[in-house]
Image (cartoon, coloured by chain):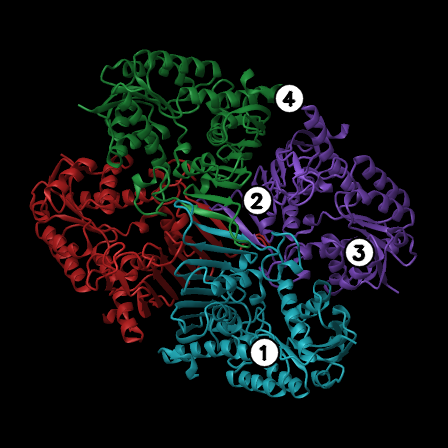
Chain colours: A purple, B cyan, C red, D green
Amino acid sequence: MNSLNVGLVGSGFMGRAHAQAFRAVGGLYDLPLTPVLDLLSERDEATAAQAARALGFQRHTGDWRALVADPAVDVVAITTPNRLHAPIALAAIEAGKHVYCEKPLATTLADARAMAAAADARGVVTLVGFNYLKNPMIALAREIVESGEIGAITGFRGIHAEDFMADPAHPFTWRCEADNAGGALADIGSHILSLARHLVGDVTAVSGHLHTVHDRRPVAPGSAETRAVAVDDQAHALLEFANGATGTVTASWIAQGRKMQLAFELVGTKGSIAFTQERFNELKLYTTGGPRGRQGFRTIEAGPEHGDYAAFCPAPGHQIGFGDLKTIEVKGLVEAIGAHKAGRKAAAYPDFRDACAIEQIAEAIHVSARERRWIAVDSV
Amino acid sequence: MNSLNVGLVGSGFMGRAHAQAFRAVGGLYDLPLTPVLDLLSERDEATAAQAARALGFQRHTGDWRALVADPAVDVVAITTPNRLHAPIALAAIEAGKHVYCEKPLATTLADARAMAAAADARGVVTLVGFNYLKNPMIALAREIVESGEIGAITGFRGIHAEDFMADPAHPFTWRCEADNAGGALADIGSHILSLARHLVGDVTAVSGHLHTVHDRRPVAPGSAETRAVAVDDQAHALLEFANGATGTVTASWIAQGRKMQLAFELVGTKGSIAFTQERFNELKLYTTGGPRGRQGFRTIEAGPEHGDYAAFCPAPGHQIGFGDLKTIEVKGLVEAIGAHKAGRKAAAYPDFRDACAIEQIAEAIHVSARERRWIAVDSV
Amino acid sequence: MNSLNVGLVGSGFMGRAHAQAFRAVGGLYDLPLTPVLDLLSERDEATAAQAARALGFQRHTGDWRALVADPAVDVVAITTPNRLHAPIALAAIEAGKHVYCEKPLATTLADARAMAAAADARGVVTLVGFNYLKNPMIALAREIVESGEIGAITGFRGIHAEDFMADPAHPFTWRCEADNAGGALADIGSHILSLARHLVGDVTAVSGHLHTVHDRRPVAPGSAETRAVAVDDQAHALLEFANGATGTVTASWIAQGRKMQLAFELVGTKGSIAFTQERFNELKLYTTGGPRGRQGFRTIEAGPEHGDYAAFCPAPGHQIGFGDLKTIEVKGLVEAIGAHKAGRKAAAYPDFRDACAIEQIAEAIHVSARERRWIAVDSV
Amino acid sequence: MNSLNVGLVGSGFMGRAHAQAFRAVGGLYDLPLTPVLDLLSERDEATAAQAARALGFQRHTGDWRALVADPAVDVVAITTPNRLHAPIALAAIEAGKHVYCEKPLATTLADARAMAAAADARGVVTLVGFNYLKNPMIALAREIVESGEIGAITGFRGIHAEDFMADPAHPFTWRCEADNAGGALADIGSHILSLARHLVGDVTAVSGHLHTVHDRRPVAPGSAETRAVAVDDQAHALLEFANGATGTVTASWIAQGRKMQLAFELVGTKGSIAFTQERFNELKLYTTGGPRGRQGFRTIEAGPEHGDYAAFCPAPGHQIGFGDLKTIEVKGLVEAIGAHKAGRKAAAYPDFRDACAIEQIAEAIHVSARERRWIAVDSV
């Protein structure tokens, strides 16, 4: 039977998103395997039972180790707090499961590398949830870059800014601790780094700066007691790319008014691209040439000729949503596992190796900020 | 058992959208009934079998009459060409089924009224697929209007423009025939009329104009043989509303470059709203008052405080997609049927009566255009 | 000597704008005549003296008849309240002066026609201040239309909305009286009608609607005494053009939040244009053709290749302002007078005849609204 | 007599802009002095004669030394290539003239400092042409920042990008030479640095990066012979401000499609501002607070309540142009000279000292880029 039994660890925002994507994907694509919402684990039995019911899973458990060990489970989807990614993924890999893990892959680069090495050694399929890479408009951007339509890439200016930590009264959370890969750069900056790498290629050197604006936060909402924040509220870096392009990147979770400003401007010798996730069904494209007096950035609306859009709608301009990005992501996972089961060499994208490369850039920025000097990315 | 067996008639763009919505809704909402993709009908057995497999239905049939008569089916979803809406819906109602029908409800106002009357008489739940009304930003617009935040509404300027028929080489289709409720006004103009009614209220009188720009089209792609087009390519109307507001509405399927320009500007005595489906996760709001020199339209990004957004995402700015609008629509249907089963008076929105009211405005515009005079909407 | 002596009647907003334009134009263009700010008239000597000093005029008078009769004056610029346009212009023409008059040309179509006839008979140069037609981006739009780049024009959807009368506490002014060519349609709607005619051509028939939302206004700021308003706050019309295009137009001075929404969407068989005066250094252009998946409206920024832009700046994107539009307008006037003086047949654009044609459309809309029926424009 | 005799050196783009501003300013403001276009110098007599005629100057000379020495000249306006700024300004100061100099003030920081010191010693009024600071929307931004409306400023992200050097076939010019203060950073980056300083305050440390993308250019249009480019095509820097804010800045003259992307995002603890010179009559403002579900960036259109807008137009939304920014700049100069003549202490803004501070930041970025380390701005 061609089913793919999903074991989901965690049922928060991302857990729900995974569940919906596995639920939706079969009706949209002709897949080699049919995902089955099989087993859900949460921190305890009661929570797990309730989440399984809400999300439509057949079974539940209060122990992720049981899930990982369950022979019926084909793929383990990890949506827990960051520090659990490594132990769960390593256990799953050891058990021969394919692994679909939320970003950041791990809280240290060493852990991430160990995870990638284990996956390679065991030969399982892995995927990390950088879902914004799955946007049909990003597929279009990459197609434009790769085809040479805008020439050689010379500049990249990226940002991921939100404001969910902008209020100094926002309480201290695990994201504020030193060793949980929180901080604006690790938490959301990784998205813009993943896009930079996806579109421009490897980053070779960085000069970074981290900035903790609200250096103490209440231990609980409304509490007078505060705790020192160990991570950055905003981060900036200069980037040098392997292909000679240069640029900057900013991450901030205190950017008042910004909800999802994952945005970039990409400049090539023959054109430019501008994009923001705030209007992610659009891409702005400028190309040289054409009649005098008629040039300008054009606003391309997502349509069936772009990336995976056609799976969702045969007509342009109808727009896909955040959840659909996750569905496209899951499609790639199911196809890769299907190929793997069929005995073919198969990788999903971005896999654990890719995620390591992204985390390595972030780590280099951290080191650079601490040491106030340029850091070669391959030196960390 | 609390399942809701869905019988879907048709498996094109809208059929797939219905299927996905029924598939998704259970994981997002706590519903009284769990939709089951039970039975799908298509024009013949083979097509039905393939579509059922692709969309995940348990059973299939080549005969919609069998579907309508099937005792296991609870709700009939109709996504066929327009002229079949009436016979299928009437048969389904007669069989005591709840009915979820795509817009336009029928190809004649008389048929639409007969359908609404039959549904009333039989006491079944009905819903018509004006999915754009389900947008959280439209929920916000309505909340703003109803709360009086922008005062009394005085003006409405709406449009639904696309370009899928803009190419004169686009072949003749059933939408070009006189008696299939095609034409720009009936086919897409009904969306902007539904929004006008939703936000401003009843339209009392219209002065309309219909315009067939491409009056002959090839009988098939590339054919030299052409056939006379019986419907409008673009339509315009002046509107008088019951509450004293006035405005205009335009529908066009030949508006080059427009993919989904379902847009309006709504003016009140204390503020204004502007919206376009092209960026449907945004609403622009202007209100009077506030400090001098700081006024302006603000761009509100969809977030969990707006309409049904929170069912899809706990964080603002992530954006929902077209398919999600359909899911919200289906949620209302399932809730209404659940209430109905529980013996409570229940209506979904917009139901067949609402759809009749929308079609009545379109019909008045047609009469007005033909007779070149103002027409009272309640006279048709 | 090659000077052009300017006599300016009125020194309000538009009077100042005229003065600045005459002052600026000589430094920007190589003109046949050098404008001299010679004589300014205002309602009384004291006001005239102060205005002449402020605006840099050499002489002043408290009597416009003296200005018109002054042999040194070559061109009379009229920026008075509307009802004085006709008597001043007729007197100036009779005195053989060239006339530059603000819009609307007159408060009745009959007056406007008499003015145009007088100018024709006397052979003087006339110009009416529809300055928005002078925008380099409008020059571009017209060039695109005339070249056939967007095919045959099929649709026009225009608006001029502002909010300066939106507050019901705004006091009654001469613009609220019946016989002063006030009202949203005459006062600002004439701008969008001038653009419709400029870009699409003659309007042949209209169905109009006028709407007085605030039908009484205080006689003075804060006064409890009110006076009945005789004119429209907002107006809508359906338009049929001579070339077969159809469309709508709206005028409103109660559109909360709108400061200068003079905007249109122009649809052709091979492309579309969208424009708003709110960002009047931009034009949005869509054309069919080009590679699949790369189409979209492009935002063209004003540059030296567009209309008169190069007179102001050799580099693109620097933007011209409202005052510069007036300067371009004056350039055309000076050139036409220069040609006239050189014995060549010369007309500025739009002249009194053009302004009559614009007023005729507005008059047809008024008649249509009153009689609630379609009106042929050439019947009024 | 209250005239201010202007001596203009140079008659290119900026020379014309100065002339127009001096010509326009008297009709818009009530000034203590009336500017007179007195004497123009160009590289030779013939050029000077022609330019004087075109721009409306009374006299001309082929020698700037004669202009500087002319006793009738009150203020010397310098719009020559950059390397002449210092000698002309120093000579003018020595002759006791007030000096209005285009940016960059000088080609070396040492020269700039010498110029500022000379002006201080001689007590003349100076002004440097950072005209974008004069925008009413920038005045609004500063007012918002200073009033605390958006709290403490924490982040700044700025760019000045154009594309006039993007084509590798663009020939080598003096801007490509090492010692002429060309290069993207010095030439246009100084604008965004001036805005950063104007809105956020002093920059204390930088990490910079310069990048010459097109390192050889043809010696003339179409020539096969090329010459090595000594300056940057694009520059990036991390910034630390004295008030604790951090940020990035980018300058590029090879940003395909960008004509005037002088843009920034300014984040405070209670709100944010976004601006681009591409739409410089708008400012986007977000402030915390206000009703739930109604928050968003508002687009404020320039109006008479903002900065100097009212001098140009009494109604909002009509928009000022690039030339008007120059006129506002000149207004400040004339007022300062008027105050100086009246014996009051007077400074225009930004004066030579301000310009030194801006150049010092740019110089620090240059040093940082060369030495690949953080540089304290006060160390250069």
Question: What residue is shown at x 75% (from left), y 68% (from top)?
Answer: B54
**Marks 3 and 1, how far apart at CA:** 37 Å
Residue at numbered disc 2: A274
**Cβ–Cβ under 8 Å for marks 3 and 1:** no
Q: Residue B22, how many percent across, how many down?
A: 70, 69
Q: Amino acid at mark 3?
A: Glu
Q: Residues within 10 Å of mark 4 (few under 14, many from 20)?
A: some
Q: Is A108 in front, or is A313?
A: A108
Residue at numbered disc 1: B82
On the question of residue D105 being in view, the answer is no
As drawn, is B312 to the left or to the right of B237? right
**Whether residue D379 is situated above or below residue C244 in the rendered picture:** above
Q: Residue C78, how many percent across, how many down?
A: 18, 49
Q: Residues within 10 Å of mark 2 (few under 14, many from 20)?
A: many
On the question of residue A70 being in view, the answer is yes
As drawn, is D164 to the left or to the right of A101? left
Q: Is B205 in front, or is D183?
A: B205
Q: Quadrant of the N terminus of chain A?
A: bottom right
**Marks 1 and 2, how far apart at CA:** 41 Å
Please tell me whether mark 1 or mark 4 is closer to you in this view.
Answer: 4
Q: Amino acid at mark 1?
A: Asn
The kind of secondary structure element at disc 2 is: strand
Question: What residue is shown at x 20% (from left), y 24% (from top)?
Answer: D2
Residue at numbered disc 4: D372
